[in-house]
């Protein structure tokens, strides 16, 4: 189904605005390049002088050219071995910014009573800070292993699984829906990369924010210009 340009740089596919916000109870967000302006793993790699090498793998994974996201992330994290843990703080303070319109969009949905979920293939060091900053209800991300104040090049296995990839994002969204006692059709999923497509496919509404072509082509709403708050024009309250 072809997309219709609702406004300059704002496309809709398979839905007819205005969309009643009351139809939705949960919104799930990707973090890197969606809520925030960077890919954290790339910026950490800069501290090791390996940003170009890591960024090339990240870009290929986000375009969907690397089928095994878990393996691509392990490869990137291995390249971070030996980076001082202080580099994480520097990335957060010096590089990480919320994307335009994010705070307005999140606050509007929270005011309408929606619960909020951050589900990321990135790292807990950043996701927990972003979660607190935006007052999000739930978060799931990967944890970097640190020994003697340096990254080991590995991630910490968690009780519920090892790496948060596309399949895990989908599982977490469905799990939170179940915990809330709602259908997945009452969820909104927002992302930009190929590993967001699994959760976007089970949500009642999918939003692509400045995303890769494969994601723009499948999302019900695609924001290709301006801030995330532009999506609010498509809802009625």
Image (cartoon, rainbow, N blue to C red):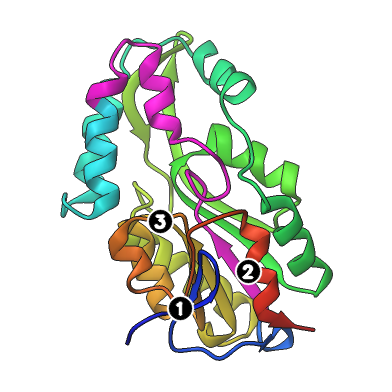
Query: Horizontal and vertical percent for residue 186?
Result: 59, 84
- Residue under pointer 2: 231
- Disc 3 from disc 1: Cα separation: 13 Å
Within the image, what quadrant is residue 6 found in?
bottom right
Q: Is the C-beta separation of discs 3 and 1 under 8 Å?
A: no
Which residue is pictured at 56% across the width and 64% down the height?
28
The residues colored magenta run 25-53
- Residue under pointer 3: 211
SS at mark 1 in the image: loop
**Other-residue count near label 3 (Cα within 10 Å), few / some / many at <14 / 14–19 / ≥20:** many
Within the image, what quadrant is residue 14 found in?
bottom left
Q: Above or below — where is 153 with respect to 149?
A: below
SS at mark 3 in the image: loop
Query: Horizontal and vertical percent for residue 73?
Result: 28, 39
Query: Horizontal and vertical percent for residue 191?
Result: 46, 59
- Residue under pointer 1: 220
């Amino acid at each position: 189904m072809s997309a219709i340009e609702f406004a300059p740089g704002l496309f809709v596919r398979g839905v007819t605005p205005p969309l009643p916000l009351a139809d939705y109870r949960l919104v799930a967000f990707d973090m890197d390049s969606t809520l925030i302006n960077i890919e954290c793993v790339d910026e950490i790699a800069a501290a090791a002088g390996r940003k170009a090498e890591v960024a090339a793998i990240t870009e290929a994974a986000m375009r969907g050219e690397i089928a095994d996201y878990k393996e691509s992330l392990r490869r990137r994290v291995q390249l971070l071995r030996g980076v001082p843990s202080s580099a994480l703080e520097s990335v957060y303070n010096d590089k990480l910014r919320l994307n335009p319109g994010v705070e307005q969009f999140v606050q509007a949905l929270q005011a309408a009573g929606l619960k909020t979920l951050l589900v990321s293939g990135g790292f807990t060091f950043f996701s927990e800070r972003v979660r607190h900053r935006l007052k999000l209800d739930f978060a799931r991300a990967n944890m970097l292993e640190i020994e003697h104040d340096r990254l080991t090049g590995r991630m910490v296995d968690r009780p519920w699984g090892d790496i948060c990839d596309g399949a895990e994002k989908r599982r977490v969204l469905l799990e939170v829906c179940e915990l809330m006692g709602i259908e997945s059709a009452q969820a909104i999923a927002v992302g930009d990369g190929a590993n967001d497509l699994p959760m976007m496919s089970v949500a009642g509404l999918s939003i692509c924010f400045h995303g890769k072509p494969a994601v723009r082509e499948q999302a019900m709403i695609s924001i290709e210009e301006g801030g995330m708050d532009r999506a609010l024009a498509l809802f009625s309250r």
